[in-house]
Amino acid sequence: MSEVRELVCALPEAELREYVLGQRWYGSKSEEVASVRAVDAFPLRPGEQEPLLAVAVVEVRFAAGTHDLYNVPLGLRRGEGGFASAGGWSAFDALEDEELVHGLVELVRERAQVEHEGGTVQFCTVGEGAGDLGEIGPVRPMGGEQSNSSVVLGDRLVLKLYRRLEAGVNPELELLRFLTEREFPSIASLEGWAAHLGQPLDATLAILQHYVPVRRDGWTLALEDLAAGGNGFVPLVRRLGEVTGRMHAVLASETSDPTFCPEEPSAEAEALIVARIDEEIDQVFSSLPDDPELEPIAGRANELHDRLQEIGQGGSLGRLIRHHGDYHLGQVLWTEADDWVVLDFEGEPARPLRERRHKRSPLRDVAGMLRSFSYAASASLLERGIEPPTGWEGRARSEFLAGYLAETDPTIIPDGSALERRLRLFELEKALYELHYELGHRPDWVRVPVAGILQLLDEEAV
């Protein structure tokens, strides 16, 4: 076992760098990289049967002195043919080898505990159903992902690997396990997971989920509807609101587990939220580039501070619960059963894992979806040159909120004008996050969050 670790850690930096920095899941493409090296490896197949299987922990260190750790499952064979080689062995992506993917799922089925010098890789199943995974079918990649990697097994299971490693339990594992154990139907249920305990860190490595046949994700469905005249999507949005409301009600239903028990916000909670958004306004507006698309909001930071004080004061905040954390149309699927399924419970990837596990107002999810309707309407024009039908976004907002309010736990949200103010507050928070993201990744899209911020500036006080 130690020989495998030594072999992986001996992989040449140049070859490892070229491989890692060229992957879609590598998340720091704008950073200057100082070094890339495997700092640890966890062998997962005992003996010498080829190909060997190991999880490499790859450290990418930046010129600024910070670093990220990545989860890189490797297959190892004697000879040549992989992306890197050392000691007469070649290394390749384990997810591209069906035998190795099947081996990972078998480890979950067996609830294996694989020990190494620094700790243990634990494979677990939900409940007692270790033998209930059935036959493991052919493997195919699931496209479209950026920060992680998923493969589908026989249209029955999905294996999702978390690429960037952070210390602690991934919030998606916590939330999926909670919702699965309570039989919430509108998710791809959790079947099992893999986690590492010990050195160099305790971290969630992967999850195994039930595969759900889908027709479209919500984003694609909305854009297709806008292109067709805008009459087919809005009737589905009320159901999406109902699913969201029920999800929050289930997440608020636990009274004994401190990880999930709803909490009354402290007297300082509202002030802290406003202070955090105040700081984000300063950070974003202090570095706005000279861009015609930004002219409608340029120089209006003080107005935005004042508007924030208006919508951030008075009334109830509701209760704080665990929530999705990155809720938008790309995170929901319209299935072949004509219903919605929610996925990707990791939270906003730009925020630290410990922050993504905090309890928040469920209205942050609601605001995220409302902002997504605005994005879809703008994308119709930006991507396809199709002007969205008049009133489409407003109808989508109204239907979603009607469905949500009909199904959620009323004790976790404020009512009346307080509800409207809190939604504006979290929509502003989301629009600032979007503006920061678009400035760094898609400058042509800054007009979308600019429009959202402008609307909040110019509308009458709630």
Image: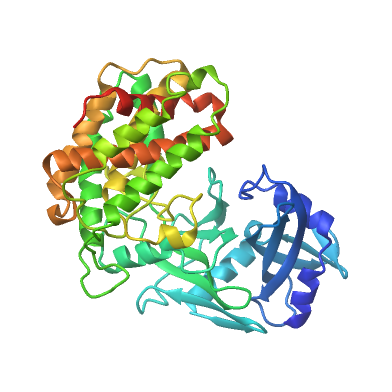
Could you tell me if residue 442 is visible in this image?
Answer: yes
| Quadrant that contains the N terminus | bottom right
Q: Quadrant of residue 40?
A: bottom right
Which residue shows up at 24% across the image and 64% down it? 263
Above or below, 230 against 302 in this view is: above
Nearest to the observer: residue 136 or residue 404:
404
In the image, is 127 to the left or to the right of 266?
A: right
Q: Quadrant of residue 456?
A: top left
| Quadrant that contains the C terminus | top left
In the image, is 41 to the left or to the right of 10?
A: left
x and y, in percent, of residue 100 in the image: 63, 66
x and y, in percent, of residue 276 in the image: 39, 48
In the image, is 217 to the left or to the right of 93?
A: left
x and y, in percent, of residue 412 in the image: 18, 55
Nearest to the observer: residue 285 or residue 136:
285
x and y, in percent, of residue 141 in the image: 57, 50
Above or below, 47 against 217 in this view is: below
Above or below, 432 against 82 in this view is: above
Could you tell me if residue 83 is visible in this image?
Answer: no
Which residue shows up at 39% across the image and 42% down it? 278
Which residue shows up at 56% across the image and 27% down it? 443
Which residue shows up at 74% across the image and 52% down it? 63
